[in-house]
Image (tube, grey):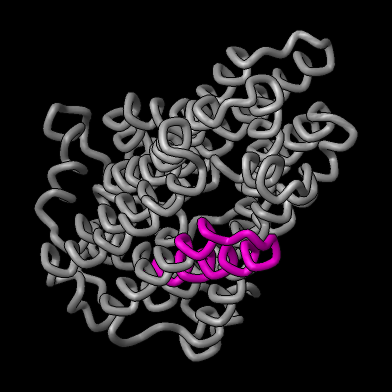
């Protein structure tokens, strides 16, 4: 099967195309490793410190490298072999979790060492995530890009369902087992990446220059659809992100232990994978801008329900709704950004997008930990949910072009 033979009306055919299948497998193995190490790191840090603020520092250590490397990652991804970049980044991530495994097994682990390893993971992830975003447009035609991105998102969510559960179970044996497993998964993902055959020619690379370094930022700032889509997600998740507080809920509020923590991290993915598979089967075609705003609003409402819940099952349902709502936003936002971006600057724009995503996740975790430290865990989550709803209202007014996007349409070659 060739890329051109993929049918928009037969979305499941994308998984019969070998490059898409290998990319999906690479995505799921990396995501499994990432989710499992996040469970182990969060639990280990909280066990060492009993401090929500230190859980926030974990998110901060993932975010800082993305900021420091913003102007470097994009040009490198646009200029060099993207498969090599992804593989090298995954090898570095394998080394980082391998280091945590050795230090933990030797009884030498400290919070400082964990945060240092997380910083290295964040740096490598900046390259890996940026290069990974550029892969789908390089292996499939534009007409099936939204479905392929939905498929890649389903891979991440499958890993998010399975990964935390496995991580929680392995934590019973000890964090060392989690880190060793993650190390192997990163290596396997690197092998899958090398099996991907690129079918679209890479555009000519411009030489490094000051204008080249800032071209991604310039493009995003001048395109209201791209800027609106990136910033809507960023600020919504900065406010509503409560993942960093899951260990607090698991130990102090619901008293469900490591296994319950794994289920809490899994719950959002249950909703997300259902939505992603529905979209793979029945693609979104019309009123995509308004649908994206609706998904972000649902995310805020569900976060509020989770925050005030005193029932563990209800909390899991609310978290599942947050995952489904977030996925609805993702499978619209990512194709819009890719289709609005010229091939020649796709790496640099993807680097900016990765920074926005990293900002939303890592700074969101830091915000949650900081607010919980000063105001309490439940008020921190409630503030985030209400803040997300306010962001939706403000962004409808600030970015009407994004709100009024009707269909997916490629503007650049």
The answer to whether residue 145 is seen in the rendering is no
Total numbered labels placed on residues in the image:
0
User: Does residue 307 show up magenta in the picture?
Assistant: yes
User: Does residue 308 show up magenta in the picture?
Assistant: yes
Residue at coordinates 34% horizontally, 59% vertically from top-left? Answer: 386
Q: Residue furthest bottom?
A: 9
- Residue 332 coordinates in the image, percent (x, y): 37, 70
Residue at coordinates 64% horizontally, 51% vertically from top-left? Answer: 26
Above-or-below relation of 336 to 213: below
> Which is more toward the observer, 195 or 38?
38
Magenta span: 303-332
Above-or-below relation of 253 to 153: above
Residue at coordinates 56% horizontally, 82% vertically from top-left? Answer: 278
> Which is more toward the observer, 175 or 223?
175
Image-based side of 146 in relation to 356, left or right: right
- Residue 190 coordinates in the image, percent (x, y): 65, 40
Which of the 4 image quarters holds residue 33?
Answer: top right
The answer to whether residue 41 is seen in the rendering is yes
Which of the 4 image quarters holds residue 35?
Answer: top right
Which of the 4 image quarters holds residue 91?
Answer: top right
> Which is more toward the observer, 147 or 198?
147
Residue at coordinates 73% horizontally, 32% vertically from top-left? Answer: 183
- Which quarter of the figure is the C terminus placed in? bottom left
- Residue 207 coordinates in the image, percent (x, y): 21, 31
Image-based side of 80 in relation to 101, left or right: left
- Which quarter of the figure is the N terminus placed in? bottom right
- Residue 56 coordinates in the image, percent (x, y): 49, 31
Q: Magenta span: helix, strand or loop, mainly? A: helix
Q: Residue furthest right?
A: 173
């Amino acid at each position: 099967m060739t890329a051109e033979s993929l049918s928009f009306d037969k979305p499941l055919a994308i998984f019969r195309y070998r490059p898409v299948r290998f990319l999906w497998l690479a995505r799921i193995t990396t995501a499994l490793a990432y989710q499992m190490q996040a469970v182990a790191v969060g639990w280990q840090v909280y066990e060492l410190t009993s401090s929500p603020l230190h859980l926030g520092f974990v998110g901060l250590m993932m975010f800082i490298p993305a900021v420091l490397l913003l102007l470097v990652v994009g040009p490198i991804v646009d200029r060099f072999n993207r498969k090599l970049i992804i593989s090298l980044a995954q090898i570095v991530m394998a080394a980082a979790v391998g280091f945590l495994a050795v230090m933990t097994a030797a009884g030498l682990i400290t919070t400082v060492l964990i945060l240092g390893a997380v910083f290295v993971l964040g740096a490598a992830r900046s390259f890996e995530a940026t290069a990974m975003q550029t892969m789908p447009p390089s292996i499939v035609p534009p007409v099936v890009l939204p479905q392929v991105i939905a498929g890649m998102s389903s891979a991440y969510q499958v890993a998010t369902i399975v990964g935390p559960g496995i991580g929680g179970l392995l934590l019973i044996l000890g964090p060392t087992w989690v880190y060793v497993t993650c190390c192997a998964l990163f290596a396997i993902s690197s092998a899958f990446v090398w099996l991907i055959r690129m079918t679209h020619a890479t555009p000519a690379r411009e030489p490094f220059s000051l204008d080249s370094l800032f071209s991604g930022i310039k493009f995003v700032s001048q395109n209201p659809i791209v800027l609106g889509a990136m910033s809507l997600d960023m600020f919504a998740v900065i406010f509503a992100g409560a993942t960093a507080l899951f260990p607090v809920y698991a130990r102090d509020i619901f008293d469900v232990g490591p296994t319950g923590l794994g289920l809490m991290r899994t719950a959002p993915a249950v909703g997300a994978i259902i939505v992603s598979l529905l979209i793979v089967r029945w693609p979104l075609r019309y009123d995509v801008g308004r649908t994206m705003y609706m998904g972000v609003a649902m995310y805020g409402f569900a976060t509020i329900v989770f925050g005030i819940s005193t029932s563990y099952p209800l909390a899991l349902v609310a978290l599942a709704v947050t995952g489904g709502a977030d996925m609805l936003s993702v499978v619209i936002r990512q194709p819009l950004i890719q289709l609005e971006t010229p091939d020649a600057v796709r790496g640099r724009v993807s680097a900016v997008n990765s920074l926005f995503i990293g900002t939303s996740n890592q700074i969101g975790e830091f915000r949650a930990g900081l607010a919980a430290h000063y105001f309490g865990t439940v008020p921190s989550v409630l503030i985030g949910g209400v803040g997300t709803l306010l962001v939706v209202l403000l962004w409808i007014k600030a970015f009407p072009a994004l709100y009024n996007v009707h269909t997916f349409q490629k503007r650049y070659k």
